[in-house]
Every structure is written in C-alpha cells, then in structure tokens.
Amino acid sequence: MSVVKLGVLRDHDFRQLFAADTISQIGSQVTILALPLVAVLALHATPFEVGVLAACETAAFLLVGLPAGAWVDRMRRRNVLMAGDLGRAAVLATVPLAWWADVLTMPQLYAVALVTGVLTVFFDVAYQSYLPHLVGKEHLVEGNSKLEVVRATTQLAGPTAAGLLIQALTGPVAVALDAVSFLGSALFVGRIRKRESRPERQPDAHLGREILEGLRFVFGNRLLRAIAACTGSSNLFGAIVQAMLILYLARDLGLKPGVIGLIFSAYGIGGLVGALITRRVAAWLGQGPTIWISSVVFGISGLAIPLAAPGWRLVLAVVAMIVFSICVVVYNVTQVSFRQGLTPDRLLGRMNATMRFLVWGTMPVGGLLGGLLGTWFGVHNALWIGAIASALTFLPVFLSPLRTMRSLPDIQPAEVAQDSR
C-alpha cells in the first residue's frame, strides 16, 4: 500500500484509534446476534422477554442521549474511551461466567444490555469528539471516511462471521470473545500518545439550560421537526421488526445461527452501496427530494421482510433488506448533511444531541412494543404490524417544504435568534 493511500493512517495516534474501533466494531457485531440468540436458544425466552431485551439494548439513547455530549465535553476523551472499553469487557464477561455456573437469567441479560448500551453511547460521543484532536480539522473528512469504512465492512462480514461463531461455539462463548475484543480495543486506546488538557468548566455552564436550548432550536424549526418525526417514527416501527426478526428466523423458520448471520449481512451490502451512491443521488434529485424519496423506498421494501420463508421468499426478503439498507444510508447521509448545513456552528453539538435523543430514543420503546405485539398477536403478525407502519413514516418529510427543496434555505440571523431563544 502506498504512503499516499495510507493518508492519516501514517499518524501513530490515529492508527491506534483506527485499530481500537476496528476491534470494537467486530466484537459488537458478535454481541448484536449473540445476546438475543442466548435468550432464544439457551433461556427459551418468550416474545415479550426478547422485546424487553431489545429495548434494553437501545434504552441508553433515551436515558443518557441528551446529557452525554455535555458530560463528555467536561472530561478527557481518551479516559472516557478506555473506561467505556474496560467497562463493556467486564459487563459482557458476566454472561459466559453465569452460563458456565448455570445461573444465567433473563434479568441479567437485561442488565448487561442496558449497561453496555450506556457505555457505548459515551464511547461513541467521545471518539467523535476526540478525532479532531488527533488528526486536526483539515483531515476530519478523511479520518471519518476511514472509520466509516470500518463500520460498513464489519456490518457486511460481521453478522456472517458472528453467526458461524455462535453456531460453532454457542452464544455465551461468543460473548466471552466479544469481552476480550473490548480489552484489545482498550489496549490500543492506551497507546495513543497525544494527551488532552483537562477541559475548563465555564463558570456559567448549566447542563439543563444547554439541553433546553438545543430542544428549542430543533422544535422551533419546521424542517428539523419533519426530519425528526420521520426518522423517529421509522426507528420506532423498525425496532418492532428488529426485535421480532431474530426470534422469527430462529424459532419459527428454524434457521441456524450461521444462516441468520448471513441474512443480516445483507444490511452491510446495502450500506456499502448506499455510501457509494448518495452524493450522486442527492446531486441528481436535490437534497429535499432525496430525503423523502429514499424514505418512501425503504418503507416499501421493508414490507417484503415478513414474507421471509424457506425457498425463494427468503431470497426475496434478503434482496428487500439490501434495498432497504441502501435507502436508509442514502436517507441518513443526506438528512444529517442537511441538518449540519442548516444549523449555526454554536448549536451543532446540541442539535445533534437533541436529534439523537429524539430519533434513537424511540428504539427501546419499539423493542418493548414489539415484544408486546409478539405476545398478543404472534411473532409473524408483529412483523407485519411494524412493516406496514414503517411504510407510512415518509409522510412528515413528504408533507413538508423538503418535498421540493433541492438545496438548503439561507439561515437568517433573526431566525437563529428566534429558534435558539
């Protein structure tokens, strides 16, 4: 590989962060499949219990999504990264230990999922904030691109490898390997040489006031409200589908973990394709139309997922998952870029934290709702309810000015003052 192609990877500290993120992402792909499969195959969990577990995995977005950014800004980011890795390693290690001692229970899996999720939120916020310190603002695009390649690649190959690993070694053993992976990640973070000075806390800093300002800006802007409504509702109903999908594939269809992992790799294929075509699609259609059209297509394609059954219908569902993932990535990249361009610099952090809280905070609710629907109406019917509802989530952006808006509107100083007041 040439020096030119290496780019920021020539920098020692970025290489350590890159290696830590790679190891962490691979391990996380194992746990995404392993925890619910431990619940389904080892503990014979009910649909409601699987739904509660799914809710616990994403509850951190709702519980600490808003204040996490402000808290991280008050600490040394490298220390947060190491604490997140070591904490996740310790928590995950309790699963195989309890399984070997024959004392593993669903409440323990709930606690592991919840604590791991909280630590992941802090890790993600910290590494995104730490990157400018490591590579400088002039190399941010390149640094983020290389880390995005890691994420997309692990989503492509990770589920298949995770499924085969779980099938060969059982879910608890796979979770043990994930715990070891976080220790490896912490080791590389510890090798970063650049040290941050301890952030100085401003005398007038007030967490509640800062959070409220971000909420007012998002809710006061019609375009941001529409994006939040579309994304949040899509995540809500999508979480219903995701909570029941593994249970449906493993129990109702009787598929082996290796096959389930291969199926979930379809999301990675779509993610890579989506990342490659987003810029051209947005340039062709315009930002606003790209947002609503991609949301229409991923909603419609999701209707094929409950059709999964052995034979050609399973192939159809996998193709639909690829199309779904392509459109989700196109939607997300476009709407995030749109939001960043629309927001004044001084409000970017709070806008992003507020949007993350609003659109990811619906996921634990969806997971719990999926468990309830699966209990009341059956797992397959719960999949249909989530898929049909997801097909309607494009309406907020379609009925907004985004429908015909090819580019960003100009931000007027008076509007900024009004929105952030």
Image (cartoon, grey):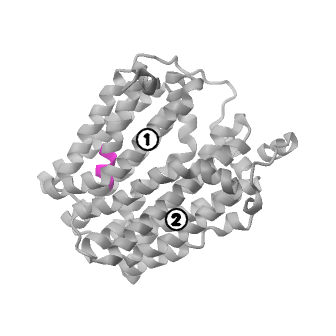
Residue furthest toward the bottom? Answer: 377
- Residue on which the image places disc 2: 236
Q: Which residues are magenta?
A: 27-32
Q: Residue at horizontal 56%, vertical 54%?
A: 330
Residue 142 among magenta residues: no
Indicate whether 316 appears above or below 177: below
Nearer to us in this view, 368 or 259? 259
Residue 125 appears at what percent x and percent y? 50, 38
Question: CA gap, disc 1 to disc 2?
Answer: 27 Å
Residue 55 appears at what percent x and percent y? 42, 60
Q: Are marks 1 and 2 in contact (CB under 8 Å)?
A: no
Q: Residue at horizontal 35%, vertical 57%?
A: 265
Q: Is residue 112 visible?
A: no
Q: Residue at horizontal 38%, vertical 76%?
A: 374
Of labels 1 and 2, the one closer to you = 1
Q: Residues within 10 Å of mark 1 (few under 14, many from 20)?
A: some
- Residue on which the image places disc 1: 149
What is the three-letter code of the residue carrying label 1? Val
